[in-house]
Image (cartoon, rainbow, N blue to C red):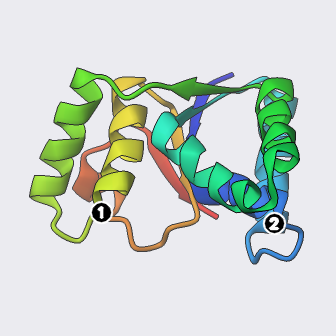
Amino acid sequence: MGLIHLDAGVVIGFLDGNDAHHSASRAMFTDALHHGDRLAMASSAFAECLVGPARSGDAEIRIVRELFERLPISIVPLDTEIAVVAAQLRAKHSSLRLPDAIVIATAVEGAADELVTTDRKWPSARRLKLNAILRHL
């Protein structure tokens, strides 16, 4: 049992059967639930997951919210400490976008065991000095 923090692409891939990451995302969720892992996500990443459904209307947003409640995936609000760590990550890694730095900082501050993303452009866990495992789907 561990704590897994998710990047938005993992959930977006899960929700879209045509997404290139759908199978890997589905397998990750199945494995996490089987092992009793806890799931969490930065509030900014949650907002990113809702952009596509928001284009379709409130009913689609409700479906995603219900998924988060059923799994459950905890939504972690952005606080001062996460913001500071995100700024430090962004300052040190110029290729890292601020939204991604917030996701990584949320995992760092939450003492995640694993951080799962679909973004291959992130620096390595070693370069980020993460204590968590960084898994790319």
> In what element is the residue under mark 2?
helix
Q: What crowding class fits label 2: few (fewer than 14 Cα within 10 Å), some (14-19), or many (20 or more)?
A: many
Q: Which residue is denoted by mark 1 in the rendering?
A: 97
Q: Earlier in the sequence, mark 2 or mark 1?
A: 2
Can see residue 35? Answer: yes
Residue 136, quarter of picture: bottom right
Count all numbered tags in the image, as a single digit.
2
Residue contact between numbered discs 2 and 1, judged by CB atoms under 8 Å? no
Residue 130 vs residue 24: left or right?
left
The quarter in which the C terminus is drawn is bottom right
Report the residue at 80% width, 53% height from top.
Answer: 57
Can see residue 6? Answer: no
- Which of 46 and 6 lies nearest the eye of the viewer? 46
Q: Residue furthest front?
A: 57
Report the residue at 52% width, 46% height from top.
Answer: 45
> In what element is the residue under mark 1?
loop
Residue 14 vs residue 50: left or right?
right
Residue 51, quarter of picture: bottom right
Residue 112 vs residue 82: left or right?
right
Q: Which residue is denoted by mark 2 in the rendering?
A: 22
- Which of 89 and 2 lies nearest the eye of the viewer? 89
Mark 1 belongs to which amino acid?
Answer: Arg
